[in-house]
Image (tube, rainbow, N blue to C red):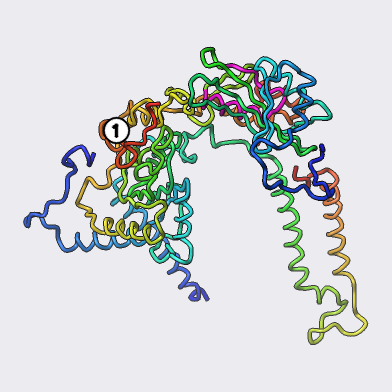
Amino acid sequence: MRTGASASGGEPTTQKNISHRGEPANPSAQALQQKFGGSIKRVEVIWGETVVYVDPSSVHDVIRWLKDDPSQRYDFLSDVTAVEYRDPEVPIEVVWHLRSLPFRQFLRVKSQLAKGKPLEIDSLYDIYRSADWLERECYDMFGIRFRGHPDLRRILMWESYREGFPLRKDFPLRGRFSRSEQLRQALAQNPEARYSMEELSIADAYAELPQEMRDRLSKGERTGE
Amino acid sequence: MFRAYFPVLMLFGFVAVNAAAIIVISALTIRARPTPVKQQAYESGVPALGDARERFSIRFYLVAILFIIFDIETVFMIPWAVYYKQLSCFVPLVNNACPVGNISFFGLGEMLVFMIILFVGFVYVWKKGALQWD
Amino acid sequence: MGLSGPTERRTVSYAPESQEGWVATRLDFLVNWARANSLWPMPFGTACCAIEFMATAASDFDLARFGMERMSYSPRQADVLICAGRVPFKLAPIIRRIWQQMPQPKWCISMGACASTGGMFDNYAVVQGIDTIIPVDVYVPGCPPRPEGLLYGIRMLQEKVKNERAADKGTRDEMEPDPTSQLYIPPSVIDELGEPFGNSVNQTRSGL
């Protein structure tokens, strides 16, 4: 039942009394297993939400297919995050929350990164623009680098934050430096150092300008507003 | 005849003395404590970026010019309106009324000619797109 | 500087031979009365305490009867910086700069537990009390403080304002942060202020 509407054909309803493991899986899970076979490690349904575990090297292709295929059309990436479990043997999982607005489906895609190796995975920036800041947040909090991200830098903490990655399990709650050192570093931050005034004023509207105006701007002409 | 303006003169004098006193007393009593950060422009707590002297869009100037022109047209209409009764009569008014049979459209016609000339200008401005804000 | 030892400000002496004359005391009274009853607040509201501040300004509790209904969102026209809410480290230089851009005379009310001590957020991201960044005159405890609590703090500030003396040269001095570190109190004092205490000493979760 791809449409997500209730059986009576009216408005979509919220399902009540969802069981822990017994709900039916999202049909996309089976479609993924048929299409990608070995890359799909595991499928679980927890509290009605389908989780698909994917091999890290094929995540980009899997999600690209999930977005582009007409029977899947997961056009909304609502979250990119990561999980580090208390057991140090368990790898870190990167989690993507995909929603299909036309079909009203939700899919959670996870990929496991072993802790001994550098934490790197492909960026979804070329598939979803929202991945821009979502992946920056994931990098800021966990230290996971996203290959192919155009501008991977800290977003929640300030850019020159040096204490580490706050949501990792080995990061102490109060941070690694003393309070006075944290304050000293915080007061020394300078976010405006990245941009010049022209870049700031032009960057926003640049894509909407006609081509000949972009040529004139690139030659240094200043705008009037 | 000028005695009537004496209170106005007193008011001017009081205002001038008051303003001067406020400025002079403040300058003498204030102990200024300038610091470099205090002197900088306020920009929500971040260091101010860029120059405040930016070029303004020309459409503000256009609106101002058009306003002046049509406002002056309106100003010219006011004395005409005051004397409209006289202007629409061939003979001088009798008891503030125009004698029967002497109605003229001379005043109206004159003002209409004036307005038509300016209306042509208005149509030109309109067609040229000067009234487009964007 | 008040915490590191006896203050070095030049204060008014109460010895009889140095008593100020009648005119000076009356002038002090007049100026302080005017200032205390027309404190224009700058609401630096970041979180939940800002809502309580708005409630205090609204009709049920009414700040207007204290002369404080004219909120100034520009520091240039404000008398009191009311920091209502938690201040993350990323916001620290901003509140510092806004404080420095307020002209004298200025006071600061730290409203709520988070602005006073960091509140329940004893973590890597929240400043453990804005008094580590700017000098605070009145702390209002609460999470959030009830409007009556904030009004009590404002009354306390008004009493403080009324007890100032023009002859006291040091009161209206600007703070001078250390040029390299930008801290205005010694780092040991900041560490001491930011130490966990009470229940949170046992809830570190950092030794996992």
Q: In this view, does C147 lie above or below A210?
A: below
Q: In this view, does B134 lie to the left or right of C105?
A: right
Q: Is residue A180 above or below residue B72?
A: above
Q: Is A121 one of the magenta-colored residues?
A: yes
Q: In this view, does B28 lie to the left or right of A185?
A: left
Amino acid type of the residue tagged 1 in the rendering: Asp
Which of the two residues, C25 or C8, is positioned nearer the viewer here? C8
Residue positioned most to the bottom: B95
Residue positioned most to the top: A117
What's the chain of the residue with tag 1? Answer: C
Residue positioned most to the front: A22
Residue C194 % position (x, y): 32, 36
Rendered image quadrant of residue C182? top left
Residue positioned most to the right: B101
Which of the two residues, B70 or C174, is positioned nearer the viewer here? C174
Q: Name the residue under label 1.
A: C191
Q: In this view, does A124 lie to the left or right of C208?
A: right
Rendered image quadrant of residue C39? bottom left
Residue C124 % position (x, y): 41, 32
Residue C181 % position (x, y): 33, 27
Q: In this view, does A23 lie to the left or right of C95?
A: right
